[in-house]
């Protein structure tokens, strides 16, 4: 008879079988599916070349009202800040001294006229006498000279009268242009015009205004080179300026550049430009700071990529492109300006390349992906 199996022997056999089973290699887990990303093709389009600057508004014409003669301000006739028309009376000066000067000049003319009549009468009497040698030639020459002298004095007296009338007219101070008048700079009762043409007020024409701004010399040269090389086509009719007001609204009127300075400011390294803008409602006031959006031309065949596809980093801008094998390739780009919802690519990307716009956080270079076309933004 066989001997019975002991429990300890049975336990050893079970442990041996378990160790044998554990020594089998584990099954390989299945590879994860390629991540799904949405792509959009980089596109080519003609886009406007728009740059922004800070500008300041000034009046189209600014007329300084000044006292042209010395006198006491008698009365002011305008309301400060109101509109005035050409020819409106603004101030009067005390005209009594000027009326007296005019009367004195007229009296002097009358005296000289009397002297002239007497001189001409004497010359007429002496003329036949000198022919008969009844008087000396010197006496007749003196009579002729007296007529000429009185004639000259009369001409001077007439000029004095003209000047006196002109000075009297200057006591009524008027504006020669329409516009909006500012604050009165001199009160009634003050002496003005003593030694200088005292500034009394200013009339600004603001139904049209100037907007002056500056462009860095490097930017101006780069733009000029791009125009000369044909990379940018000039705007028909000249550069167009639009304004962004301090409250964030866009001014409804567009303006044109009417002046570009011929020299560079040595202190700031900038070139001054000026745009003229229609201002029928007088929304733009002198001294107002605005942002100037200047369209200088059109850029043909610009490469555009959606802004949400671009990854910013301390070293620059990057996009991820899907190649023909559906693998990810990283591109470092040189970026230009924004255009709507897109970014203009200066270098590093070609039109038609598939750029990852959604799922950028899932990808890395060399990774195979599953792609789906992203919906194009409205207007593209």
Image (tube, rainbow, N blue to C red):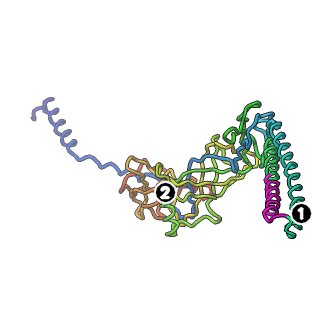
Say which quarter of the image contains residue 10: top left
**Where residue 252 sits: x, y (%)?**
70, 50
Tell me if residue 267 comes above or below residue 121 in the rendering. Answer: above
Viewer-side residue, 378 vs 220: 220
**Res 38 seen here:** no
Say which quarter of the image contains residue 192: top right
**Residue 272 is inside the magenta segment:** no
Where the C terminus falls, by quadrant? bottom right
**Where residue 301 sits: x, y (%)?**
53, 66
- Which residue is located at x 43 percent, y 61 percent? 347
Q: Residues within 10 Å of mark 1 (few under 14, many from 20)?
A: some
| Callout 2 touching callout 1 (CB < 8 Å) | no
**Where residue 335 sits: x, y (%)?**
46, 56
Viewer-side residue, 269 vs 365: 269
**Where residue 349 sits: x, y (%)?**
44, 62
**Residue 152 is inside the magenta segment:** yes
Q: Which dot, 2 or 1, sits closer to the camera?
A: 1
Q: Which residues are magenta?
A: 135-156
Instruction: Say which element carries label 2.
Output: helix
Q: Residues within 10 Å of mark 2 (few under 14, many from 20)?
A: few
Residue 219 has which mark? 2
Identify the residue under disc 1: 124
**Res 98 seen here:** yes
Viewer-side residue, 229 vs 174: 174
Residue 216 has which mark? none
Where the N terminus falls, by quadrant? top left
Instruction: Say which element carries label 1.
Output: helix
């Amino acid at each position: 008879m066989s001997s019975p199996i002991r429990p300890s022997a049975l336990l050893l056999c079970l442990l041996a079988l378990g160790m044998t089973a554990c020594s089998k290699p584990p099954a390989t887990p299945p590879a994860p599916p390629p991540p799904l990303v949405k792509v959009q093709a980089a596109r080519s389009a003609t886009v406007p070349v728009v740059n922004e600057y800070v500008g300041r508004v000034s009046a189209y014409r600014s007329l300084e009202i000044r006292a042209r003669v010395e006198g006491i301000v008698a009365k002011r006739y305008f309301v400060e800040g109101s509109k005035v028309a050409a020819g409106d009376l603004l101030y009067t000066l005390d005209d009594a001294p000027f009326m007296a000067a005019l009367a004195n000049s007229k009296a002097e003319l009358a005296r000289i006229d009397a002297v002239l009549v007497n001189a001409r009468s004497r010359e007429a009497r002496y003329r036949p006498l000198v022919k008969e040698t009844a008087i000396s030639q010197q006496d007749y020459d003196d009579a002729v000279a007296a007529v000429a002298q009185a004639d000259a004095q009369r001409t001077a007296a007439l000029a004095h009268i003209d000047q006196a009338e002109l000075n009297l007219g200057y006591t009524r101070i008027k504006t020669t242009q329409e516009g909006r008048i500012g604050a009165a700079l001199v009160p009634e009762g003050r002496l003005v015009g003593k030694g200088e043409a005292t500034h009394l007020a200013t009339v600004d024409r603001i139904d049209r205004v100037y907007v002056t701004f500056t462009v860095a010399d490097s930017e101006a040269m780069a733009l000029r080179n791009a125009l000369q090389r044909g990379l940018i086509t000039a705007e028909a009719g000249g550069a167009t300026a639009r304004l962004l007001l301090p409250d964030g609204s866009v001014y409804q009127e567009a303006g044109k550049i009417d002046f570009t300075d011929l020299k560079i400011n040595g202190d700031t390294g900038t070139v001054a430009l000026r745009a003229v803008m229609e201002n029928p409602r007088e929304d733009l006031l002198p001294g107002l700071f605005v942002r100037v959006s200047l369209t200088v031309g059109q850029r043909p065949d610009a490469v555009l990529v959606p802004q949400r596809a671009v990854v910013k980093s301390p070293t620059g801008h990057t996009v991820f492109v899907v190649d023909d094998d559906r693998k990810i390739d990283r591109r470092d780009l040189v970026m230009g300006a924004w255009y709507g919802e897109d970014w203009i690519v200066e270098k590093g990307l070609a039109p038609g390349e598939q750029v990852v716009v959604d799922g950028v956080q899932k990808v890395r270079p060399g990774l195979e992906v599953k792609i789906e076309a992203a919906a194009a933004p409205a207007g593209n």
